[in-house]
Amino acid sequence: MRLTQGTFSFLPDLTDEQIKKQIAYAVSQNWAINIEFTDDPHPRNNYWELWGLPLFDINDVESVMYELESCRKQHSGLYIKINAFDNTRGVESCVLSFIINRPSYEPGFELIRSEDIGRNQKYSFRSYATAKPEGSRY
């Protein structure tokens, strides 16, 4: 099952050249960029691990690509995404987010149904990956 989160998630994986163009656009808009990774891509897991520090006031696409390649070397079997934040209104709003690295096998999610008060049905889902302990999921 292919995880679909963020911009471009229904398209084939971006090449490095396409990633550079997206980063160049974000830099041209003066957006802050950060790189995050996780082994638990649950849609409600908003707190991915941050790679290094957020890249504020970056004017060079190659410095972002260097950080990205460093993250890929360290976490090649995990999900990695790039986020861009716009602070023109005084708050950091995420305006661009896309996955740039995936594990070779994506196990998908399990739908869990349970009964509630008055025979109402509640549905939730969890990642099959979380059946294994953190650090050994992929």
Image: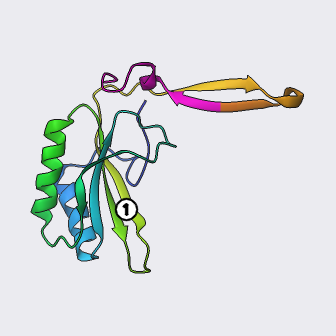
Q: Which residues are magenta?
A: 124-138
Nearest the viewer among 64 and 4 is 64
Name the secondary structure under disc 1. Answer: strand
Q: Residue furthest bottom?
A: 89
Is 34 left or right of 64, judged from the image as shown? right
Residue 8 location in percent, x, y? 37, 52
**Residue indicated by mark 1:** 96
Is 70 left or right of 95, judged from the image as shown? left
Is 14 left or right of 108, judged from the image as shown? left
Residue 91 location in percent, x, y? 44, 73
Q: Amino acid at mark 1?
A: Leu
Seen at 18% across and 50% down, the residue is 68
Height in image: 49 above or below 19? Answer: above
Q: Residue furthest front?
A: 53
Which quadrant of the view contains residue 49? top left
Name the image quarter holding the C terminus.
Answer: top left
Is 20 left or right of 89, judged from the image as shown? left
Residue 47 location in percent, x, y? 42, 46
Name the image quarter holding the N terminus.
Answer: top left
Which quadrant of the view contains residue 89? bottom left
Seen at 41% across and 63% down, the residue is 94
Height in image: 20 above or below 123? Answer: below
Q: Residue furthest right?
A: 118
Residue 38 location in percent, x, y? 34, 38
Neighbour class for label 1 at 10 Å: few (<14), some, many (≥20)?
some
Height in image: 28 above or below 9? Answer: below
Seen at 38% across and 75% down, the residue is 87
Would residue 66 be counted in the magenta stretch?
Answer: no
Which quadrant of the view contains residue 103? top left
